[in-house]
Amino acid sequence: MPRPPLRISDERPRQRELAIKYTLRTIELAQRVKAPAVVLHLGSMEMKDYTEKLTRMLERDGRKSLKYEKNPRRSRRQPRSPKGKGGRTRL
């Protein structure tokens, strides 16, 4: 039986410690082989699925609906953060 993935966000201390340990090993290996980047998936969380509700709302009211847009003043397209900031770290 396959084991569930290790997550840094795990609530169980031992699982979190193992996730950190293997993440550090991955970064060390990446440095040794001169990898240009390492992608880390730090965990996940359970969320209620609003897909069907949003789809119905979109079909009924369109994109201009105030209910569809969480913040109607905010632009739909957010500027991307510059490289090296906000998510990507170069080795």
Image (cartoon, helix red, strand yellow):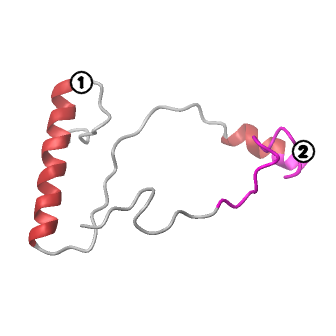
Q: Quadrant of the C terminus?
A: bottom left
**Which residue is nearer to you in this view: 48 or 80?**
80
Q: Residue furthest top?
A: 12
Q: Residue at x 67, y 42 (%)?
A: 51
Q: Earlier in the sequence, mark 1 or mark 2?
A: 1
Up/down of 15 relative to 71, above or below: above
Q: Name the amino acid, label 1.
A: Arg
Q: Main secondary structure of the magenta part?
A: loop
74 left or right of 37 in image: right
Residue shown at 8%/70% (left/top)? 32
Q: Residue at x 16, y 34 (%)?
A: 17
Residue marked by disc 1: 12
Q: Secondary structure at mark 1?
A: loop
Question: Which portion, as a residue range, is magenta?
Answer: 58-78
> How many C-alpha atoms fall within 10 Å of the one at disc 2: few (<14), some, or many (≥20)?
few
How many C-alpha atoms fall within 10 Å of the one at disc 1: few (<14), some, or many (≥20)?
A: few
Residue mark closest to the camera, 1 vs 2: 1
Residue at (66% x, 37% y) in the render: 50
Against 21, residue 11 (above or below) is above
Residue 78 in sight here: yes
As rendered, which of 44 and 21 lies closer to the eye? 21
How far apart marks 1 and 2 lie (CA) works out to: 43 Å
Res 1 seen here: no
Residue at the disc numbered 2: 60
